[in-house]
Amino acid sequence: MTLTRPELVTDYTLSRSDIAHFAEHGFVKLKNVLSPETIAAYEPEITGKVIELNTQDLPLDERDTYGKAFLQVMNLWQDSEQVLDFVSSPRLARIAAQLLGVQSVRLYHDQALYKESGGGVTPWHADQYYWPFTTDRCVTVWVPLQETPMEMGPLSFAAGSHVFEHGRDLPISDESEQVLQQALADQDFTEVSEPYELGEVSYHLGWTFHHAPPNTTDVPRRVMTIIYVDAAMEIAPPVNSFQEADLATWMPGNQPGEPISSPLNPVLY
């Protein structure tokens, strides 16, 4: 039985300024992409799956910086028809295709990022460090499942940094936070740090540098992310162990030099 809410299959109207902002700055924040009712319909299932599938059992004070940043659970859609329904949304996928300027997009994978109460900083990084792709036509959709004030640790972007190649070889770490904080400041990239309203969603390119402050509230910051890629994307030879793992995990049976064709990466729009 389908669980799709009508909103998830209807179009969202992007303005020319939205598309221009994304092209210039490497990200865009969009208000009222999802209604409070739609978020309320899916949040309990997503949160329940995070609790069920989470494998992090160390106390916060015993984890490294990456572990303190968030609980990370990937491809929830494989364990939940309701989550599959959410991440396959034509509404969300069409926005991605329009922003990327491509005919259609595939699902790469999803990941829930739950920053616990007391969770630490998410260091500066670019997502595409982890992905073996030949072009930059890939985007992360960041969907908060609650109103997200600054105290809860919303995503912050270095506007225009998708064209900055320094630091692209750094994984999320104390080093990436230190090196990129300085390098981005030296290049005068403006850091955009703003709260998210309920229903507000952001899209950022794979090479856009971003980070997030700690969660100093007494409730977790619940966020669902979805990575969409150009449906014609070809696989690049992996340049680090994370990309090797991504190729094996998210694109099984595919090889470098080939277009993505794994059944785990369906065309959505």
Image (cartoon, rainbow, N blue to C red):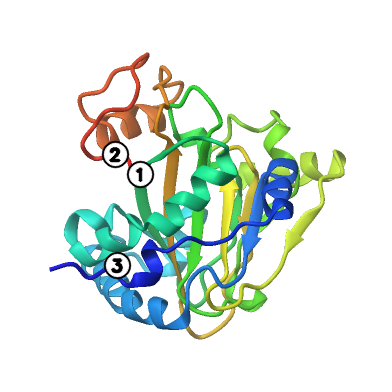
Q: Which residue is at a point 68% across and 37% down the rendered structure image?
A: 162
Give the image location of residue 180, x and y in percent.
71, 42
Q: Is mark 3 on a helix, strand or loop?
A: helix
Residue that carries the numbered disc 1 in the rendered image:
107
Quadrant, the N terminus = bottom left
Q: Which of marks 3 and 2 is in front?
A: 2
Residue that carries the numbered disc 2 in the rendered image:
265
Q: Nearer the viewer, mark 1 or mark 3?
A: 1
Q: Which residue is at a point 35% across and 76% down the rendered structure image?
A: 43
Residue that carries the numbered disc 3 in the rendered image:
50
Q: Which amino acid does label 3 sit on?
A: Val
Quadrant, the C terminus = top left
Q: Which residue is at a point 65% across and 44% down the rendered structure image?
A: 209
- Mark 2 and 1 residues: CB-CB less than 8 Å, in contact? yes
How many angstroms separate mark 1 from mark 3 (CA)?
20 Å
Q: What residue type is labelled 2?
A: Asn
Q: Is residue 68 left or right of residue 27?
A: left
Label 1 crowd bin: few (<14), some (14–19), many (20+), radius 10 Å: many
Label 3 crowd bin: few (<14), some (14–19), many (20+), radius 10 Å: many
Residue positioned most to the left = 1
- Mark 3 and 2 residues: CB-CB less than 8 Å, in contact? no
